[in-house]
Image (cartoon, rainbow, N blue to C red):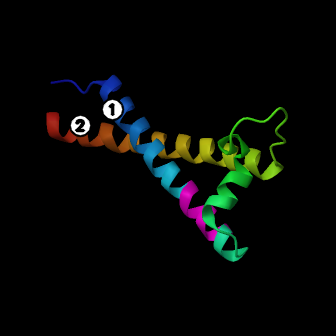
Amino acid sequence: MKPNPAISTAISVAGAVVMATGLLTITLGVIAFVNDTPFVEYYEYVFPRFRGRASYVHIPLMGYVAFVMYIGVAAIIAVLARRQIDTWQRRHTQ
Protein backbone atom coordinates (compact mmCIF):
# COMPACT_ATOMS: atom_id res chain seq x y z
CA MET A 1 0.00 0.00 0.00
CA LYS A 2 1.44 3.37 -1.06
CA PRO A 3 1.47 6.18 1.57
CA ASN A 4 -1.27 8.75 1.04
CA PRO A 5 0.21 12.28 1.08
CA ALA A 6 -3.16 13.90 1.81
CA ILE A 7 -3.59 11.89 5.00
CA SER A 8 -0.07 12.58 6.26
CA THR A 9 -0.49 16.28 5.45
CA ALA A 10 -3.80 16.48 7.31
CA ILE A 11 -2.36 14.69 10.34
CA SER A 12 0.76 16.86 10.40
CA VAL A 13 -1.23 20.10 10.07
CA ALA A 14 -3.64 19.10 12.83
CA GLY A 15 -0.75 18.17 15.11
CA ALA A 16 1.05 21.41 14.29
CA VAL A 17 -1.96 23.53 15.17
CA VAL A 18 -2.41 21.76 18.49
CA MET A 19 1.29 22.00 19.39
CA ALA A 20 1.67 25.64 18.28
CA THR A 21 -1.46 26.64 20.20
CA GLY A 22 -0.09 24.94 23.29
CA LEU A 23 3.25 26.70 22.89
CA LEU A 24 1.48 30.04 22.42
CA THR A 25 -0.59 29.47 25.55
CA ILE A 26 2.47 28.49 27.59
CA THR A 27 4.42 31.49 26.32
CA LEU A 28 1.61 33.91 27.15
CA GLY A 29 1.28 32.27 30.57
CA VAL A 30 4.99 32.71 31.30
CA ILE A 31 4.96 36.32 30.10
CA ALA A 32 1.85 37.05 32.19
CA PHE A 33 3.49 35.43 35.23
CA VAL A 34 6.69 37.46 34.77
CA ASN A 35 4.68 40.68 34.42
CA ASP A 36 2.50 39.71 37.42
CA THR A 37 -0.63 39.94 35.29
CA PRO A 38 -3.55 37.50 35.19
CA PHE A 39 -3.34 35.27 32.12
CA VAL A 40 -6.80 36.19 30.82
CA GLU A 41 -6.12 39.91 31.15
CA TYR A 42 -2.82 39.55 29.31
CA TYR A 43 -4.42 37.41 26.61
CA GLU A 44 -7.15 40.02 26.11
CA TYR A 45 -4.47 42.71 25.88
CA VAL A 46 -2.52 40.84 23.22
CA PHE A 47 -5.67 39.79 21.32
CA PRO A 48 -8.16 42.66 21.94
CA ARG A 49 -10.89 41.27 19.65
CA PHE A 50 -11.87 38.88 22.45
CA ARG A 51 -12.99 41.83 24.62
CA GLY A 52 -16.13 42.31 22.59
CA ARG A 53 -17.21 44.79 19.98
CA ALA A 54 -15.55 48.16 19.79
CA SER A 55 -15.71 50.88 17.19
CA TYR A 56 -11.92 51.09 16.99
CA VAL A 57 -9.57 48.47 18.32
CA HIS A 58 -5.85 49.12 18.43
CA ILE A 59 -3.99 45.83 18.21
CA PRO A 60 -0.66 46.14 20.02
CA LEU A 61 2.56 45.25 18.24
CA MET A 62 2.96 42.27 20.57
CA GLY A 63 -0.26 40.83 19.13
CA TYR A 64 1.16 40.84 15.62
CA VAL A 65 4.47 39.41 16.82
CA ALA A 66 2.69 36.60 18.67
CA PHE A 67 0.55 35.80 15.63
CA VAL A 68 3.53 35.69 13.25
CA MET A 69 5.47 33.51 15.68
CA TYR A 70 2.44 31.21 16.02
CA ILE A 71 2.19 30.78 12.24
CA GLY A 72 5.94 30.21 11.91
CA VAL A 73 6.08 27.61 14.67
CA ALA A 74 2.99 25.83 13.32
CA ALA A 75 4.53 25.67 9.84
CA ILE A 76 7.82 24.27 11.14
CA ILE A 77 6.03 21.67 13.26
CA ALA A 78 3.85 20.67 10.30
CA VAL A 79 6.86 20.17 8.03
CA LEU A 80 8.75 18.12 10.62
CA ALA A 81 5.68 16.05 11.46
CA ARG A 82 4.99 15.39 7.77
CA ARG A 83 8.53 14.06 7.34
CA GLN A 84 8.19 11.77 10.35
CA ILE A 85 4.79 10.49 9.24
CA ASP A 86 6.10 9.78 5.72
CA THR A 87 9.11 7.94 7.14
CA TRP A 88 6.88 5.89 9.43
CA GLN A 89 4.50 5.07 6.57
CA ARG A 90 7.36 3.94 4.32
CA ARG A 91 8.74 1.62 7.01
CA HIS A 92 5.37 0.05 7.73
CA THR A 93 4.18 -0.37 4.14
CA GLN A 94 7.22 -2.13 2.72
| The disc label shown at residue 89, or none | 2
User: Residue 14: which quarter of the image?
Assistant: top left
Determine the residue positioned at 61% across, 46% down.
Answer: 70
Give how far apart the Cα atoms at labels 2 and 1 are: 9 Å
SS for dot 2: helix
Amino acid, disc 1? Ser
**Measured from the top left, where is residue 24 in percent x and y?**
57, 55
Q: Are marks 2 and 1 in contact (CB under 8 Å)?
A: yes
Find disc 1 in the rendering and name its residue. Answer: 8
Above or below, 4 against 94 in this view is above
Magenta segment includes 30: yes
Q: Quadrant of the C terminus?
A: top left
Q: Which range is magenta?
A: 24-31
**Measured from the top left, where is residue 37 in percent x and y?**
69, 70
The kind of secondary structure the magenta stretch mainly shows is: helix
Determine the residue positioned at 53% across, 43% down.
Answer: 74
